[in-house]
Amino acid sequence: MKWWQKTVVYELYPKSFQDTTGSGTGDIKGMIKRLGYLKSLGVGAIWLTPVCKSPMVDNGYDIEDYCAIDPSYGTMEDMDLLFAEAKKRNIRIVIDLVFNHTSDQNPWFLESKQSKDNPKADWYIWRDAKEDGSEPTNWRGIFGGSAWTWCEERQQYYLHTFAYQQPDLNWANPDVRKALYDAANFWVNKGAGGFRVDAIPYIKKPEVLKDGEPDGKDGMVSVHDMTVNTKGILDYLHEFKENVTEGHDIFTVGEANGVKASELHEWVGENGVFDMIFEFSHVNLEFKGIETWCKPDPWTIQDLKKALRNSQEATRDNGWYPVFFENHDKPRCTDHYFPEDADKGQCAKLMGTLLYTLRGTPFLYQGQELGYRNVKYDSIQKYNDISSYGQYDLALSEGLSEEEALKAVHRFSRDSARTPMQWNDQENAGFSTGIPWLPVHDDYKTMNVEAEEKDPSSVLVYYQQLAKLRADYAPFTKGDFEEILEEDENIFAYRRNTKDQSIFVLLNFSGKEVSYDCSLTENMQYIFGNDQPKTGVLKPYQACIYVKN
Ligand code: GLC
């Protein structure tokens, strides 16, 4: 097995992790200060969301310079020190490659927009207006509004899958691809342990860009549906692999929403382009698409089981599965999967058990290990996330009242995942001595690292114990996945078998006590869980792990 299959990856949101200067924004020195904490979680790799120079319109996913550190985070010397200090603790640093687009302040774009015949004229996707002067197509960007923005200077529109400050690069141009591979190799040479590759299914555009059937009252169609996984995309990615990652002991995980299980073998594994891809069906149970963001679909525990089962099956022979339930774009899992009145501590531990026992590499998201909850600011203005604004407006245009739209923001805003890290019960939770860029969650007095480290029954200690078990028992990493009780409406149960040992995991996703066939745990030893085990019965949200030698 490769090192990255055996370890735990921690996704760190730099802006909110630890501020050491009083600026209100986290920084690289803060990461170095907290490496010991990450080590105590059994983490072997830290995926940093982008730390490159950026105007921060989308918190770093709008890159101005791929080979410079944003001054708000520190310097390249700080970054080199982070690599070195992490290495001492056997922790690798994973870089986020944002290659579908750059910032509109990137010198490449500043040059490209000047004229139709400058040397970088076709580094981005430029099109003339329709005859009536309107946008070249009726595509809606992922953050809402048209995916096209008019450029006065050049007298043309440019395409942006996300915000207008994030113009899409033209991957059809070999010079663009070379410049991106050079940027990635800059980080390989720094010693990166891997790459998370952002928004990758959008890099290739269709030959002809044309209007699509409108899917909303705004007369537009989601750009996702018009450009995702365009035929030929894999040729580019094979080229990326050959030029960047091949021959290095690093891993790649692509953010590849929309790759079907039947196509997976082309994307991951030996003949694929990445080691893993993030697939979103289990975190998007409530979404049919971006346009229905404000009208969530109801879902059942069976639906969740099905999504998890499918991804386990799909990666049995193809590549490897990156297990995740939270990231910087998603709400907190304690609120996402469980009702308001549930015991959220138990739910957090249940999700931790699932995260560490499914077959694959656990990707733990900052704050998840403390049992974080969503934030519910009382007005849209208090939110920072650019996509929450667009989606709030979309909700209003779909006929929701302001109150209903705000409720949807409470449920789905990406800011819930971005509130500052809660280190202690002091001012600003020990995150910063200045004014935090995003308000600290008001539960920090009790939910913080210092308090949870001292409490043997805390979510944090539970996560530390899980990491230790994962390292101690081979089936956690090496075992295959065999689902039991497939038809059960409340319990998700599975075995992870190796030749010599297996673990058996029982998870009650419902808020009621449920029973199961006692013989299932016969001759097995209970090793861990979030409550006292009782054969044949699971309390609400109870998680149990048994072992059989
Ligand atoms: C990805 C990132 C998200 C970002 C978007 C545009 O989905 O995870 O945070 O806004 O790409 O780069």
Image (cartoon, rainbow, N blue to C red):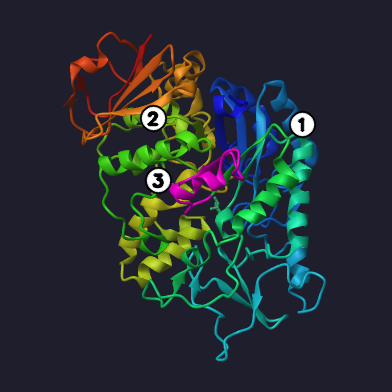
Residue drawn at x 41%, y 41% is 332
Q: How far from the left and from the top, in percent, is residue 443?
A: 41, 36
Quadrant of the image occupied by residue 378: bottom left
Per the rendered image, the range of residues in magenta is 256-281
Marks 2 and 1: CB-CB under 8 Å? Answer: no
Residue drawn at x 29%, y 55% is 297
Q: Is residue 253 left or right of residue 293?
A: right
Q: Above or below — where is 372 with respect to 112? A: above
Question: For this rendering, which residue is in front, 424 or 305?
Answer: 305
Q: Earlier in the sequence, mark 3 or mark 1?
A: 1
The residue carrying mark 2 is 354
The residue carrying mark 3 is 283
Q: Amino acid at mark 1?
A: Leu
Q: Earlier in the sequence, mark 2 or mark 1?
A: 1
Marks 3 and 2: CB-CB under 8 Å? Answer: no
Quadrant of the image occupied by residue 187: top right
- The question of residue 272 being in magenta is answered with yes
Which SS class for mark 3?
loop
Q: Amino acid at mark 2?
A: Leu
The residue carrying mark 1 is 81
Q: How far from the left and from the top, in percent, is residue 185?
A: 77, 44
